[in-house]
Amino acid sequence: MRPRRNPPLIAARSFEAAARHENFQKAAHELHVTPTAVSHQVKRLEQYLGTQLFVRNNRAVSLTPDGQRLAARLDTLFSALEDVLDPARYAEAKPLRVTAMPSLAAKWLAHRVAEYALHAAFPVELTDDDRVVSFEKGDFDVALRYGDGNYPGVTVEAWMSAEVIAVCSPALPGAASLAASSDVLNYTLIHDSTVQLSGKPPGWMEWCELANTSLPPSHPCLRYSSVYVALEAARAGKGFALAPEPLVRDDLRQGHLVAPFRRRLENPYAFWIVYPHHLRRDSRVQAFVHWIKGCD
């Protein structure tokens, strides 16, 4: 492969701007230099090519025939170069890597992201993981988190509130006629480990306290490690489960679960959109954030 001759690209860029505007001052404004700098670069290009490119009058310049031909070629070349070096081209080619806790990924996110990815200008990769990820390794671009919103060193945007409601299968005997919140004590209560998190999202003990009753230590219960498994047990008619409303929204709409009580427990936790500071202007991240905030 033969070595390149290193043509004067800065001089060519200066000439292209001056030819397009037919004015050194306007070219200088575009290039953020002085008119004198543009004039010097044009003279350098004329010396390199051995031909005159501009006819210089007192207050105006006009292209020579050689200048016209070169201007047309350079316009095409610089337009192609701008297209090749457009950062958006490379940002859109990369997949957006999103991580979310498994219950959120399964109960709310998976099918919505699948629909979004059909029309997005970039691929979306969804990973379900309970661990709080570090963006420093570069494994993920966006994290959808359930917590108190205190995530230092990253950009955090509020997403969805997480009021907790009691749900059960519509096939659970007597569920349709329940009235008082304390009536849940007539059924098996399904627990999940999220109530053990720091900040403690409300559980059955808080539910019973607000219902002016207490939870007997020997009350029948089932215990699972995740909200997702607890909700699957509730769907199967094994008892009542507590869950943040967004995680049961689709099941309620589709009739897989019912929420017999109006009571909602306030939750110190909510859902948050988190991403590194350096991706605040990333077109993929901003498109995804705009979309997900508009989802129901």
Image: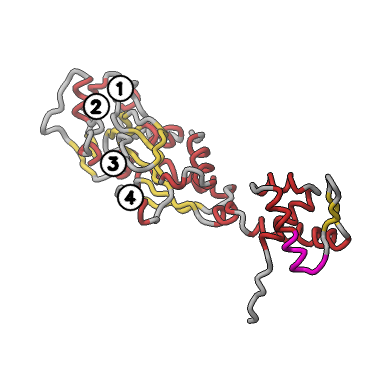
Q: If you read the primary sequence from the N terminus, does the residue marked by circle 4 or circle 2 appear first? A: 4
Whole-angstrom CA distance, mark 2 to mark 1, is 8 Å
Residue holding disc 1: 178
Element on which disc 1 rests: loop
Which one is earlier in the sequence, the residue at label 1 or at label 3? 1
Magenta stretch: includes residue 44: yes
* Residue wearing tag 2: 184
Magenta stretch secondary structure, dominant = helix
Which one is in front, 278 or 43?
Answer: 43
Q: Amino acid at mark 4?
A: Val
Of residues 110 and 122, the one nearer the viewer is: 122
Where does the N terminus fall, quadrant-wise?
Answer: bottom right
Is tag 2's residue or tag 1's residue first in the polypeptide sequence?
Answer: 1
Type of residue at label 3?
Ala
Where does the magenta region start and end?
43-51
Circle nearer the viewer, 3 or 4: 4
How far apart are labels 4 and 2 at the CA level? 37 Å
What's the mark number on residue 133? 4
Q: Residues within 10 Å of mark 1 (few under 14, many from 20)?
A: few
Q: Answer whether labels 2 and 1 touch (C-beta < 8 Å).
A: yes
Q: Residue at x 26, y 35 (%)?
A: 239
State the image coordinates of residue 198 (x, y, percent, origin top left): 21, 37
